[in-house]
Amino acid sequence: MDILAIETSCDETSAAVVSNGTNIKSMIVSSQIKIHSKFSGVVPELASRSHMENINFVIHQSLSEANIDFNNFSKKIDAVAFTSGPGLAGALLIGTIASKAIASVYKKPLIPVNHLEGHLYSYYINNSSIYPPFLGVIISGGHTEIIIVEKFGKYKTLGITRDDAAGEAFDKAAKILGLSYPGGPIIDEMSKNGDPTLIQFTRPLLKNGWDFSFSGLKTALLNYVKTNQIKSKKHLSDICASFRQAIVETIVFKAFKAAKVFNLKNIVLGGGVSANSLIRKMFINNGNKYEVNIFIPALIHCTDNAAIIGCAAYLKQKKCGLNYNSLQLKSDPSLTLYNW
Ligand code: KG4
Ligand code: ZN
C-alpha cells in the first residue's frame, strides 16, 4: 500500500510517499523556522500563507523523488493521507484542501490522520514488529500526554499537560533567556556544557497523578533571571542544563512509574521533544535498569513531517479500511485522540 501523505498542522509543510507504513520512498519538509523565529513563536497567519506558497512544491518534489508524476500517479499511489488535526486552523486547511483536490482528481481514497497518532506511531517506521500494548509518551510543542495504547487505535489517556507542553516550555524558556526559536534544540545544545545542579527547580506534580504542568517552571526561570544577572556563557549553559533536567526528569519519572503501575514492558516516545539528547539517554538508561523496552523514533521523524502521517495512515486503514465520511474528512484544530 503506497500512500501520499501531507502534513501542514503547524509550521512545517511536508509531503511523503510511504510504502506499507515503513518504507519511506520520499519525504520533503519545508520548514518555516526562519519566518517565525523573528517572533519567537509560530504566527498562525504567516504559517497559513507559507503553507500556501510551499504546498505544491513539496508535493511535486516528494512524488518526483519517488519516481511518480501525474501520469503514473493513478498506478503508483493507493491512497492520500492528510493531517486532519489538531493544529492551527488555517494551516490544517491548506493540507486538507490539497489532499482532497488530489484525491478527487485521481479518484483515490482519503485517509484522515490525527497528528498525535503520527507522533505516537512514528516508532513503527523502524520497529514494525512492535505492537501494542505499550505506554505511549507524546512530547511535542503542543502536547504532553502519556497514554496506554491497548491496541492500534485503542487508547486510555492517563495524563496530559494542564498548561504548557514540554516543547512549549523549552521555547518560552529560550525566549526568556534571549535564545532563538525553536528553543528546545538550542537549550539542549547549550545544556551539554552546563551544570544541571545550579538551580534546583521543583519537579512539578511529581507525586500527584499522571498530569503534567510546566508553566510554573517557566515562571521560576523568569524569577531567577530577574534576580540573577547572566554572567557568562557558562552561567547560561548551567541555567539551560538545570531547566532541561527538571523537564526531562519529570517526564521520565512519570513514564516509568506508569509502566510499573500498569505492568507495561514497552514504552514508545514520539514528538519533537523526543529528539532531546538527555531524554533519549535517560529513557534508555532507565529502560535497561528497570527492564522496560524503549522505542524512540529516529531523529528525523521526531519533529513534524509527512512520513509519520503516512505511517499512521497505513496502520489506521489496516483496521478501519478506506471509507471515511465527510465528518471525518474535515480538519479539526482541537481534535483529541479518539478510538477507532
Ligand atoms: O512535534 P513537533 O515538531 O511539533 C508539534 O507537534 O508541536 O515539536 C516541536 C517542538 C518544539 O517545541 C521544539 O522546541 C521541540 O519540539 N524540540 C525539542 C528538541 N527538538 C525539538 N525540545 C527539546 N530538545 C530538543 N532537542
Ligand atoms: Zn507534531
Image (tube, rainbow, N blue to C red):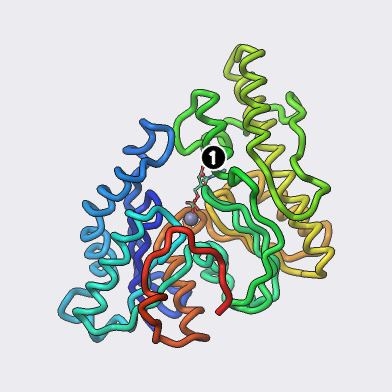
Name the residue at 46% across, 65% down: 308
Q: Residue 198, percent across and down?
A: 74, 24
Q: Amino acid at mark 1?
A: Gly
Residue 139 against residue 22 in the figure, above or below: above
Label 1 within 8 A of ligand 1 by Cβ: yes
Estimate the x, y position of residue 139 in percent, counting from the top left. Answer: 59, 53
Residue 143: give x, y in percent of width and height: 56, 53
Residue shown at 33%/63% (left/top)?
Answer: 15
**Which residue of the protein is positioned furthest toward the left in this rendering?**
71
User: In the rendered image, is residue 25 in sight?
Assistant: no
Say which element carries label 1: helix
- The residue where tag 1 is placed is 184
Q: Residue at x 83, y 57 (%)?
A: 289
Left-right relation of 37 to 157:
left
Q: Nearer the viewer, residue 174 or 164?
A: 164
Q: Is residue 35 left or right of residue 292?
A: left
Quarter occupied by residue 36 = top left
Quadrant for the N terminus in the image: bottom left
| Residue 288 falls in image quadrant | bottom right
In the rendered picture of this protein, how many numbered marks are placed on residues? 1
**Residue in the picture at 52% in, 86% down:** 319
Q: In the figure, 47 relative to 65: above or below? A: above
